[in-house]
Amino acid sequence: MNKPETKSKDVYILGIESSCDETAAAVLKNGQVVLANIISSQVPIHRKFGGVVPEIASRKHIENIMPVIDEAIKQAKITKKDLDAVAVTYGPGLVGALLVGLSAAKALAFALDKPLIGVNHLEGHVFANFLVDPTLKPPFLALVVSGGHTALLIVKDYATFELLGQTRDDAAGEAFDKIARVMGLQYPGGPEIEALAEHGNPAAMDFPRAMLSNGYDFSFSGLKSAVINYLHNEKQAGREINKADVAASFQEAAIDVLVKKSVHALVQTGLKKIVLAGGVSANLVLQKELAAAAQKVGAELVHPEPLLCTDNAVMIACRGYYQFLEQDFAKWDLNAVPNLKLG
């Protein structure tokens, strides 16, 4: 399938995202021009709990959703009537959080008599790459790496995805967060581990790399347990722990698996572009090592800018734009799907 034909007039899509702890709204023009990108983050609220508390997240979304949407419309310098459609994340994510964004989107779309578009949050992360590389066209490979998901898939066209493999247990980002917590680092753990690892030796500890020869599926529970057990044993023995070395060695082990699986997929599929998607895609070491490895097999890496790596509504509006061109509209009974799958 080629890129769908665009309308002769400008297309304005409002994107709404509330799957976890970010309340976000964005306005996108013609699938490329970001007119507004508003994000209300709850990270400072959840940090003291060491992770996201679903009930608190839902209540904060209720407080923030309409002010965030109104600010996005204001920043875009358009009226709500100028919108062509309302795109909203309906999964995966926290069910209560999803329902807040979904309810607001339904109410707005119904009141304006505009199409409602349900967007898979993970597909949104993949489509963020269209905003940084206008030449990007399917087919290409995508590595989705976040706190809840780790997956390799082929984006065959603008509406078709083939899942090659995914994690069988912990997601890579989940391992980052849990190890950071054991080490006494702040939530979210990914950026904290990365910052600490800059001062450590990635070869100091030889942590396990699981399932390197077993197809495209991932497993990070063994790596997570090995690091946590190491920290526990060293503490019990009264030995001083070099946290920077632990962070660097863990990060290197996790990235090693992600890169080797991705390169294997590039070689086997013959695809020449791979995109990074999800919160962990902001990791500079992952970007650097995957770009170098892809280049060795004649492929190119595309990754979003930092603001588009973490949860945002621009990516939802972008995915929604392509669904709009296909007239892939949702019915009014669209519900939250907390375990929505890729592919």
Image: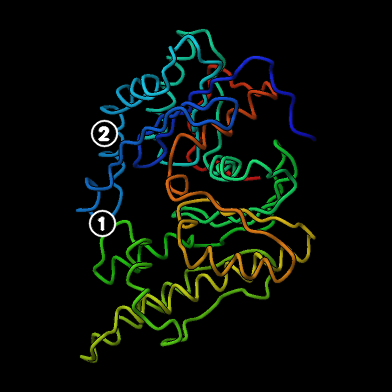
**Occupied quadrant, residue 135:** top right
What is the quadrant of the N terminus in the image?
top right
Mark positioned earlier in the residue sequence (2 or 1): 1
List the residue tagged with mark 2: 60
Label 1, residues with CA under 10 Å away: few <14, some 14-19, many ≥20: some
Query: Dot 2 lies on which element?
Result: helix
Q: Which amino acid does label 2 sit on?
A: Lys
In the rendered image, residue 229, in percent from the top left (x then y), is placed at 35, 80
In the rendered image, residue 191, in percent from the top left (x then y), is placed at 36, 61
Q: Nearer the viewer, residue 243 or 232?
A: 243
In the rendered image, residue 152, in percent from the top left (x then y), is placed at 64, 56
Q: Residue at x 70, y 55 (%)?
A: 273
Colour style of the rendered protein structure: rainbow
**Which of the labelled discs sits on residue 50, or is there none?**
1
Q: What residue type is labelled 1?
A: Gly
Q: Residue at x 78, y 64 (%)?
A: 268
